[in-house]
Image (tube, coloured by chain):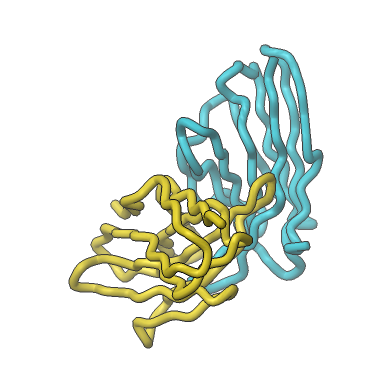
Chain colours: A cyan, B yellow
Amino acid sequence: DSGVTQTPKHLITATGQRVTLRCSPRSGDLSVYWYQQSLDQGLQFLIQYYNGEERAKGNILERFSAQQFPDLHSELNLSSLELGDSALYFCASSGQGADGYTFGSGTRLTVV
Amino acid sequence: AQSVTQLDSQVPVFEEAPVELRCNYSSSVSVYLFWYVQYPNQGLQLLLKYLSGSTLVKGINGFEAEFNKSQTSFHLRKPSVHISDTAEYFCAVLISSGSARQLTFGSGTQLTVLP
């Protein structure tokens, strides 16, 4: 157990639908990051939140949004889903300083 | 902009043989470098990291990596691999500015250890 909790582990939904992925960071970590992993794109950074505020943005589509709540958990919202959104979505957290991230076990999203 | 290139997408090697997984980076600022491992159907686990100091970094499971600034490389090595080392390995570079951070990953190297 890495200390980063992601739910659900698996999600199957239809095209056009909206889903919410949830992440609880490791205790004490203020930063949360979201990544998408797919066979053709590899590991793509989506977005970072630090203590409730957006801090860095990567290749995140406009149909996707995220937020971090006062208790530091984060949610990634994916809307108007397309087949190509099928992927593993990872959440990671980190403390302060130039240190590595701790990753959750991911949510596997399948859009049918 | 920073980037990471993993030169080999697949590396097959026999059990107990040595292995080197290659990684080159490009960055115009100070770099912090990492290797992560991903076992099937799992998340990414930190193997080792270079932040500063000694250029030879030792990590978990007997892996080590050497930071070479002149060659902009951070190759991962293990003197003797086991079947259980079969996994995908990712090199990554972190750019940090205040509280904003971006960890950029290479495309990954699939290490397959053969009996």
Is residue B12 depicted above or below A102 in this figure?
Answer: above
Give the camera-side residue of B111 and B54.
B111
Q: Position of residue B56 (x, y in %)?
A: 38, 82
Q: Quadrant of residue B55?
A: bottom left
Q: Residue at x 56, y 50 (%)?
A: A48
Q: Position of residue B83 (x, y in %)?
A: 60, 60
Q: Could one spot residue B35 in this view of the protein?
A: yes
Q: Quadrant of residue B68?
A: bottom left
Q: Position of residue B48 (x, y in %)?
A: 51, 72
Q: Quadrant of residue B91?
A: bottom left
Q: Could one spot residue B105 in this view of the protein?
A: no
Q: Residue at x 60, y 46 (%)?
A: A34
Give the camera-side residue of B28 and B74.
B74
Q: Residue at x 60, y 17 (%)?
A: A83
On-image quarter of the C terminus of chain A? top right
Q: Position of residue A91 (x, y in %)?
A: 65, 49
Q: Residue most toward the front?
A: B115
Q: Is residue A4 left or right of residue B54?
A: right
On-image quarter of the N terminus of chain A? bottom right
Give the camera-side residue of B55 and A23.
B55
Q: Residue most toward the left?
A: B70
Q: Residue at x 41, y 65 (%)?
A: B19
Q: Residue most toward the bottom?
A: B54
Give the camera-side residue of A111 and B75.
B75
